[in-house]
Image (cartoon, rainbow, N blue to C red):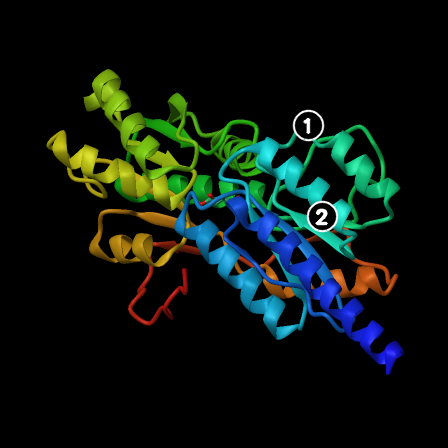
Amino acid sequence: MRVKRGKELAKRIKVFVATVSCLALTVSSIGCKTPKQNDPKLLLGFSQIGSESAWRIGNTNDIEKQAENYEVSLMLENANQKQENQIAAIRRFIAYKVDVIAFSPIVEEGWDNVLMEAKNAGIPVILVDRDISTEKEGLTSCLIGADFYREGEMAGEYLIRKADALGLEKVNIVEITGTDNSTPMRQRQAGFADAIADDERMTILESIDGDFLKSRGAECMRSLLEKYKDEITVVYSHNDEMTLGALPEIEKAGLTPGKDIIIISIDGGQEAIDVLKQGKINCVVECTPKLGKEVMETAIKLKNGEEVEEVIHPQENVFTDEQDLSKLEPRGY
Ligand code: AHR
C-alpha cells in the first residue's frame, strides 16, 4: 500500500512539474502542450519565429496538427520576431531534456553557441523553413523547408515571359525584401537577380527591407512611389503580406496594380490568390507552410537513431495571370 501511495505521489509530482514547466514556457508562447505523462512517444521542442504573416500562422497550425496526428508531445514557443527569444527557448528545451529540437531561425547567423549546447546534450536539431550559416560541422541534423533560390528564379522567369508578352523594352523593378539576413530574403533575392541577369531590359532601381510585414510593405511602397513613381514597371515583393500592404499605396497614388505596375509576390496564401484572380497581382510563387508531416516523421527517425535526409524541399508551383485559376483548391493558409 505504501509503495502504491509512494508511486501515486511520484506520479503527481511528475504531472505537477510538467505542468509548471509548461506554464513557464507559455509566457510568450502560442501554445504549449503538457507532455504526455506515460512516456511520450517523442517530446519535441519547437521554436517558431513569430506570427508575422498568414504563412507563419499556417505553418504553426500545420506543425500543431501534425504533432497530434503523429502523437508527438509538442512544446511550442513563439519568439515574437526576436532571435534572443529563440535562443532562450532552445536553452529551455535543453534543460527540459526534450528528445528533439526544431526551430525556424529568424536570421542565418548567431546560433553556434546554443546549438553547441544542444549537441553537447545529445539532442538532435531540425531546421524548419530557414537555414543557418555556420563554420561548425554537425550542429544540426537536417533542413526541412522551401527552395527559396528556386522561388526567386521562378519569379524572374515569369517577369521575362511577361515583358515579352507586353513587348516591354525597359523594365524598372523595385524589390521589397524580407527580413534582412534571413534565408528567404537572401535566396529569393539571389534567385531573382540571377534569373534576370542576362536580360538587358531589366534594372533593379532599389531593394528595400520590408521585414515580411504588411505595415512595412505599405511604408516601403510609399517611399518607393515618392522616389520613382512614374518609373516603376514592376514590384517584386518577397511575401504576400508585404504585397498586400503595398497594393493600397499604389492605388492611393492613382495607379492600378496589375496593369500600370506588374506585381509579383511569394507565398500563395488565400488572400493573395484571390487578389491575383481579381487582376491586381500578376504572379504568386508558391511557398508552402505545410512542413509539419516531414518534421514529425524526421523527428521520430532521429529519436530512433535512424538516418535522415540532409535537406527536404517541398514541391512548389507558380500561379500567374497566364493561367485559368478557377479550379484552384482552397489554399488553407
Ligand atoms: O520563411 C518563410 C517566409 O517567412 C514566408 O515567405 C513569409 O511569409 C514568412 O514570414
Depth check, front residue: 297 or 36: 36
Q: Name the kind of residue labelled 1 in the image.
A: Gly
Furthest residue toward left:
254
**x, y percent for residue 306:** 86, 63
The image quadrant where one finds the N terminus is: bottom right
The label shown at residue 93 is 2
Rendered position, 303 above or below 232: below
Mark 2 closeness class: few <14, some 14–19, many ≥20 residues within 10 Å: many
Q: In the image, what residue occupies the spot 65% across and 42% down?
A: 89
Question: What secondary structure is found at the residue carrying circle 1?
Answer: loop
Depth check, front residue: 6 or 289: 6
**Residue 297 lies in quadrant:** bottom right
**x, y percent for residue 272:** 32, 52
Instruction: Give me the C-alpha separation between circle 2 and circle 1.
Output: 18 Å
Depth check, front residue: 119 or 287: 119
Q: In the image, what residue occupies the spot 32% across and 64% down?
A: 325
Furthest residue toward top:
227
Rendered position, 253 above or below 305: above
**x, y percent for residue 234:** 31, 33
Q: Is residue 295 visible?
A: no
Q: In the image, what residue occupies the spot 33% across and 60% down?
A: 323
Q: Name the kind of residue labelled 2 in the image.
A: Phe
Where is mark 1, residue-wise? 110
Q: Is residue 250 visible?
A: yes
Mark 1 closeness class: few <14, some 14–19, many ≥20 residues within 10 Å: some
Question: What secondary structure is found at the residue carrying circle 2?
Answer: helix
**Is mark 2 in CB contact (under 8 Å) with mark 1?**
no
